[in-house]
Image: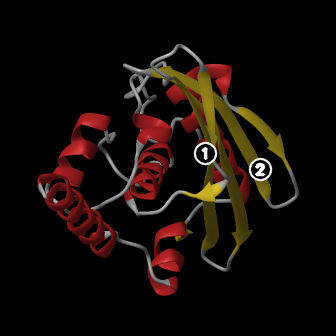
């Protein structure tokens, strides 16, 4: 009887978690992943974005340029209490010139794999797919830091400040692609003066 009651409670909790899971709508995705930036060139935006990754984790980001922008990838690993987790983050930036500046579009994908140790000591692997990072938090951080590097804002957004915004419910989602102390070498970086990448 007690076992059945516990099972029923767990099912209710899981159903509640599933019901509360957030997802961005199409309109929200377009707003979150794109920015119209005035008074800058395509090359300035690409250079600032590449600098943003360099500040966060030096040369661990592999940047491959193309006609529209670049694709940056970064492999990472993190030891946890019961095992090891690893993955690859991919950032796809496209920058299109406009009459007043540029339109930038960013897509972030994460492929993740968790390797843990069973009680017997036998390792097992749970593969993850290359899925879009849901939520607007990581995009909010990227755009705010990019604005700083382009001289569009005076303050650099640290991970501590950004985590506070998440805690207050102003933004939501995972920001670990730039704010994971376990595998990002320089979370808050030492950014240059505003506009230093221009």
- Using residue 78 as the reference point, say whether residue 163 is left or right of it: left
The residue nearer to you, when weighing 53 against 193, is 53
Foreground pick, 18 / 140: 18
Q: Give percent across and percent down for residue 76.
A: 60, 27
The residue drawn where x is 51% and y is 15% is 120
Q: For the point 67% across and 21% down, which residue is it? A: 59
At which x and y percent is residue 157?
32, 42
Kindly report which numbered mark, 2 or 1, lies closer to the viewer in this rendering.
Answer: 2
Between discs 2 and 1, the one toward the N terminus = 1
The Cα atoms of the two marked residues, 2 and 1, are separated by 10 Å
Judging by the rendered image, the residue that carries numbered circle 2 is 70
Q: Which image quadrant is residue 160 in?
A: top left
- Decide which of 39, 156 is in the foreground and name it: 156
Cβ atoms at labels 2 and 1 below 8 Å apart: yes
- Tag of residue 49: 1
Mark 2 secondary-structure assignment: strand
Q: Residue lying farthest top?
A: 121
Q: Position of residue 68 (x, y in %)?
A: 81, 61
- Residue plotted at (40% across, 46% down): 175
Within 10 Å of disc 1 (Cα), the crowding (few <14, some 14-19, many 20+) is many
In the image, is 139 to the left or to the right of 9? right
Residue name at image x 77 percent, y 50 percent: 70
Q: Quadrant of residue 69?
A: bottom right
Pick the quarter of the image with the C terminus: top right
């Amino acid at each position: 009887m007690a076992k059945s009651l516990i099972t029923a409670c767990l099912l209710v909790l899981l159903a509640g978690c599933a019901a509360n899971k957030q997802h961005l709508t199409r309109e929200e995705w377009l707003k979150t992943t794109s920015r119209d930036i005035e008074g800058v060139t395509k090359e300035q935006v690409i250079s600032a974005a590449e600098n943003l990754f360099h500040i966060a984790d030096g040369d661990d980001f592999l940047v491959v340029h193309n006609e529209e922008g670049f694709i940056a990838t970064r492999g990472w690993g993190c030891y946890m209490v019961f095992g090891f987790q690893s993955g690859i983050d991919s950032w796809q930036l496209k920058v299109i010139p406009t009459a007043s500046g540029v339109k930038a579009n960013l897509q972030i994908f994460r492929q993740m794999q968790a390797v843990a140790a069973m009680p017997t000591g036998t390792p097992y692997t749970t593969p993850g797919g290359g899925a879009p990072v849901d939520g607007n938090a990581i995009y909010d951080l990227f755009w705010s830091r990019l604005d700083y590097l382009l001289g569009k804002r005076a303050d650099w957004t640290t991970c501590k400040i950004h985590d506070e915004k998440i805690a207050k419910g102003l933004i939501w989602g995972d920001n670990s692609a730039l704010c994971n102390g376990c595998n990002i070498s320089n979370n808050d970086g030492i950014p240059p003066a505003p506009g230093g990448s221009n």
